[in-house]
Amino acid sequence: MSKEIKSVEYGLEKIFDGAEDFLPLLGTDYVEFYVGNAKQAAHYYKTAFGFQSFAYKGLETGSKDTVSYVLKQDKIRLVLTSPLNSQSPINDHIVKHGDGVKVIALWVDDARSAYEETTKRGAKSYMEPTVEKDDNGEIVRSGIYTYGETVHMFVERKNYSGQFLPGYREWKSEYNPTSTGFKFIDHMVGNVGWGEMNTWVQWYEDVMGFVNFLSFDDKQITTEYSALMSKVMCNGNGRIKFPINEPAKGVKKSQIEEYLDFYEGPGVQHLAVATDDIIKTVADLKSRGVEFLPPPPQAYYDDIPRRLGGHMKIMKEDIRELQRLSILVDADEEGYLLQIFTKPVQDRPTLFFEIIQRMGAKGFGAGNFKALFESIEREQEQRGTL
């Protein structure tokens, strides 16, 4: 079993110790990507990942500078935004970073208070509290910068009944592929530069009231060639989890260094999306052309009964099916989890997706780190970036 459970238990105890949560977060509201061609990106995420058309903003709605397509699958909303002219500052973001996450929007009950509490604690302002209105009521949004050029937007919806946000209209499309079983965002991972992880851990603690409830050092996350360090930050009610990765010294270049080189700075490395049936979800995704990291060796699957221990009695999945689909398995004292990682979803080796199914486990698959990173290194070797 993974040794991470002690940290998990300690962290959750610390989170729920009755201390006042000055920044109550109700959940993830949406994640906005800046992309080179939002229309084509929307088609890709619908076709490959099973998202549905939800809302639209563009020339037809009076937006002269940007176009945005909103996709939805269960509780997940993705916003894909592109500039409509060469003067838009979004162009600079895309030229530097390629397609990637710009905004992690957090659902709050009071966007003014969220802005006031975080900025007085040292957050850099991205957008002062702004009221946006239409016939369906009003939204209040405010925003702050986090690592790199990434933004946390606070979204207050209690006085709004519209489709998404003012300025958007319902996006109706005859083409809506069936869902692949995504339920919600389990966590989002950020990569930061050398020596910056603890700075951002402190930032999340001081500015947003998060707790570092799980840590991994370069002795736990290491292979023959590379290493990294990671700390998981969690908000007061446990709904928002942000692991933060930093490269560590190794014989060759780590996946984090590769990301920083091609993203040209810190940013969101991957979104982990939850499913209730990972075997069905992954089989469906593969049939739609989604590419996953290469599988671990046979010995990995032969060792699953030993690593899961007593959880084998309750494990429902056939190990042969997991091996056929290259799904990874790990366990802690609370249960087990299943996970798999896509290859990057754009040509730059930056953003990718994790598919995860939790069967009681609270951890992040520490027992899979070595197999996972060796798989990534095989991909890096092909790219010539290891």
Image (cartoon, grey):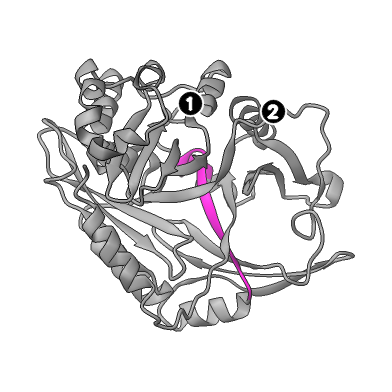
Q: Is residue 103 above or below residue 76?
A: below
Q: State which quarter of the image contains the N terminus.
A: top left
Left or right position of 191 against 109: left
* Magenta stretch bounds: 94-109
Quadrant of res 68? top right
Q: Would residue 324 appear left or right of 138 to someone viewing this image?
A: left
35 sits to left or right of 255: right
The outermost residue toward the front is 313
Kindly indicate the quadrant of the structure image that contains residue 108.
bottom right
> Image height check: is 371 above or below 336?
above
Residue at horizontal 32 percent and vertical 20 percent from the top: 295
Q: Which residue is mark 2?
A: 178
> Where's residue 49, x and y in %?
59, 30
Residue appearing at x 70%, y 33% in the figure = 39
- Label annotation for residue 246: none
Q: Secondary structure at mark 2?
A: loop
